[in-house]
Amino acid sequence: MKEITFKKRFRYYYNVNLCKKWLIKSYVILSVLCLMGINSWSQAITVDGNPGDWEVLEASNPAVYNHIEDPFGNGVIDNQFTEGSKDYNIASQLIWADGQTKAKNDIANAAAYLEGTTLYFAGDKTSNNGDAQIGFWFYLNNTGPRVLQTSPKRSGDFYPEHAIGDLFILIDFTGGGKFGTVSSYVWAGPGNGNYGNNKSLDLAGPGNVAQNNLQEYDVPDGWNFISSMYDENQFFEGSIDLASLEINDACFSRFLVEARSSQELTASLDDFAAGEFNVEPEADVNDITACENDGPFILTAIANGGLGTLEYEWKKLPSDEIIGTSSTLEVTESGQYSVTIIGEGVFGGDCPSQPAIAEVDLIISPDIDDLDDVSICSGTSYNLPTITGTNLTGNEGYFTASGGGGTELNVGDEITTAQTIYIYDVTD
């Protein structure tokens, strides 16, 4: 007599390459066509005291242009130079703090623009009382204000140190005059120049032109001011031809506009506004954190500023080998990657950015060993075996639903009914 048995089937499904840890960034790349700073218009700025040209720039947003809004007005806290800071000081001796700025020296807006080899600059003050002395710094080494303390008030110095060749333009509007006297200096380092109490500055060459507004004009759209109109001598602008100066490097990365107490180099400094000025491109790049099986993985370099056709150099650190030359790089390994964006120099040659660093973390997914289906006779049971595999997290387990759902079961649990059981592991 043949015995017929009823078998129960237990099916074991496992999910692999499941990863919850994601860092996803979206990027919109805006390509700006710009050849050596020459845009679709010719000579965007006419230095005549009329701020209307700067409104055109504000709307067009060319590659090497920046407009900064600075806090202003009675009772408004603004950063300003303190402790007798002077233009010839090294960066760590340029001391600033938040406080109330005098109306005569209260800057509301500052802007700079490069077209070809001509550098244009502009700004305003909330009061037109008395003479005006304005300074513009163009930095090669990203020099700018650094916060050293926040209590009892925010204050600090400047960092990093000046670079040899930083450009300083000094404009003196005396006697309420329409035209300003323009002088230009370069940073030579203490003891290496001929100007300033510490001999840190040298003459760079002649200035071109600077001018106040001689009549009322509308404040440019996008510029914040105490009123919608400039009174006479509240707005100023100027230009300088870099090709006429004794400088070899114009890969500027930041600029600063300052109000001064007098036309002398020894004058104390007052209000200032500082920001980026990316003749030297600024590079940015995304990080990637993902499961390694979910590729391809693409790093994308984003450029801010820069002249001409931009070039790219990718490296996998710590190696100095160039592994890519486009704006994107496909990666298959975890590690640090750097990208340098290279623009054209004002006088030819290259103008490279500081490297941007990307962190790539490709997580190894768990790989669970396969289990065969199980058939047992009616009235018997089956005990769940130990889960094996590679790169298991220690959190692997049995579940009655996929994706770690349903009821969790344990190794050794006795199974007595027909069902589908899932093995699940995940990297957090």
Image (tube, rainbow, N blue to C red):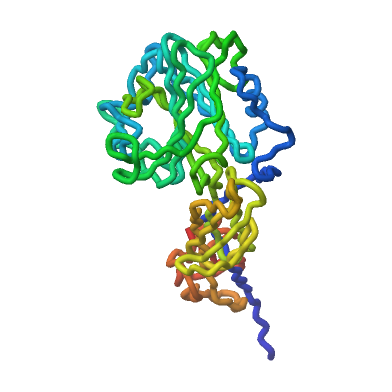
Tell me residue 60's x, y (percent): 68, 31
Q: Residue at x 39, y 16 (%)?
A: 76
Quarter assignment of residue 36: top right
Is residue 252 placed above or below 383 in the rendered structure? above
Tell me residue 134's x, y (percent): 44, 24
Tell me residue 250's x, y (percent): 52, 45
In the depicted view, which residue is nearer to us: 355 or 177? Answer: 177
Is residue 64 placed above or below 130 in the rendered structure? below
In the depicted view, which residue is nearer to us: 28 or 86? Answer: 86
**Quadrant holding the N terminus:** bottom right
Q: Is residue 421 visible?
A: no
Image side of residue 135 versus residue 94, left or right: right
Quarter assignment of residue 46: top right
Is residue 419 placed above or below 283 in the rendered structure? below
Tell me residue 175's x, y (percent): 44, 11
Image side of residue 132 versus residue 307, left or right: left
Q: Residue at x 46, y 39 (%)?
A: 204
